[in-house]
Image (cartoon, rainbow, N blue to C red):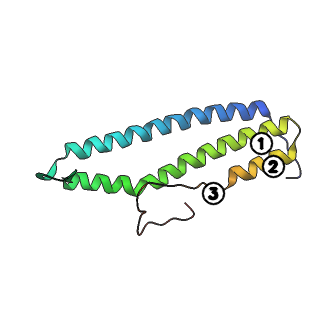
Amino acid sequence: MTAWDIDPAGVHSVLSRTRTAAKGLAETGTAMQGNLEEAASAAGRLTEQEFGPYVTAGLVGSALAQFANHWNRDLLYIAKRTAQSLNGAGQATACYVAGSLEQAANAQQAAAKEPKVDLPGKGEAGRRTGGR
């Protein structure tokens, strides 16, 4: 970065609105997880028997579980990338206002790094990772 020309009040305004939107997105994601679980449970089972601590899910329940498993990593990536970007922009702007352009550049570079997404479990065979 050779030249910076930042409007701190403008950055604050944009970050504030974006954080509000991101919070809504996070709340929607949380609600979706609960709704998927409820829908899978309400869809019934293949059998009425329970095998140990597990219940045999019905076809719809199984499909909903596969859907959730498929998209969880991507949704977590989006959440982490959004948080990292918002925090980095805020930190870089604060450093800029304090007159530390080197720290501002470092904050910007750190925010641009690929977020790491760790999910519990054994992994996802066959899923593309693409750095995520």
> Which image quarter is the C terminus in?
bottom right
Which of the 4 image quarters holds residue 46? bottom left
Q: Which residue is mark 1?
A: 92
**Residues at marks 1 and 3, CA–CA distance in whole angstroms:** 17 Å
Q: Which residue is mark 3?
A: 114
- Which one is earlier in the sequence, the residue at label 3 or at label 2? 2
Mark 1 and mark 2 residues within 8 Å of each other at the beta carbon: yes
Q: Could you say whether the residue bearing mark 3 is in a helix, strand or loop?
A: loop
- The crowding category of the residue bearing disc 1, from other C-alpha atoms within 10 Å (few below 14, some 14 to 19, many at least 20), is many
The residue at 50%/49% (across/down) is: 76
Q: Position of residue 14 (x, y in %)?
A: 67, 35
Query: Three-letter amino acid code at disc 1?
Result: Ala
At 78% from the left and 33% from the top, the residue drawn is 8
The type of residue carrying mark 2 is Ala
Q: Earlier in the sequence, mark 1 or mark 2?
A: 1
Image-based side of 94 in relation to 81, left or right? right
